[in-house]
Amino acid sequence: MIEQLEQKLQERKEAWWEWHKKNPQVWNKFEEYTLEAIKTGRKHYSHWAIINRIRWNREIETNGGEFKISNDYISFYARLFHARHPDHNDFFRLKQFKEEKIIEKLKSVDENIDRMSDKIVDLSNAVERVNQKSQLLAAQKNILFTGKR
């Protein structure tokens, strides 16, 4: 399941990158408007607001896809900005991709299952030791009461 989620995320990244290459004017405006926002003294801003400003700008012509700019691509632009402008790598507050979030939860569940399995083995070993001691005690009591071994 984790591999499928990783594959799905990779496919989304590749689809965005192909769209991005066909529509460089979107990145140019995204970068321009973001740098303008930074120059106003803002420490953080919404990548959605930047994209919506671009959407309203009638000069932008996009190619490839039904929507002018897909909502699925917005966070990719924010991540690209952070990568290209590391001095502003916290300007946009980004969440994990949904696939990353699910993968993290699945890994946590796997870790919990592993810990529980280890505890079950430990408990099973403890029960075995108690059974062995009980049998030894029973044998000792039998010797005490009957004098027979």
Image: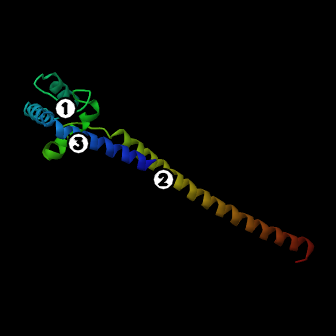
Q: Nearer the viewer, mark 2 or mark 1?
A: 1
- Neighbor class of circle 1 (other Cα within 10 Å; few <14, some 14-19, many 20+) is some
Q: Amino acid at mark 3?
A: Trp
To which residue does mark 3 refer? 17
- In the image as oriented, which residue stretches furthest toward the front? 64
Residue 77 versus residue 140 in the image, above or below? above
Q: Which mark is residue 76?
A: none
To which residue does mark 1 refer? 63
Secondary structure, mark 1, is: loop
- Neighbor class of circle 3 (other Cα within 10 Å; few <14, some 14-19, many 20+) is some
Q: Earlier in the sequence, mark 3 or mark 2?
A: 3
Q: Is residue 132 left or right of residue 16?
A: right
Q: Is residue 41 left or right of residue 20?
A: left
Q: Which mark is residue 111?
A: 2
User: By what rule are the colours in the image chosen?
Assistant: rainbow
Expressed as whole percent of the image width and height from the top left, the position of residue 6 reads 37, 47
Q: Earlier in the sequence, mark 2 or mark 1?
A: 1
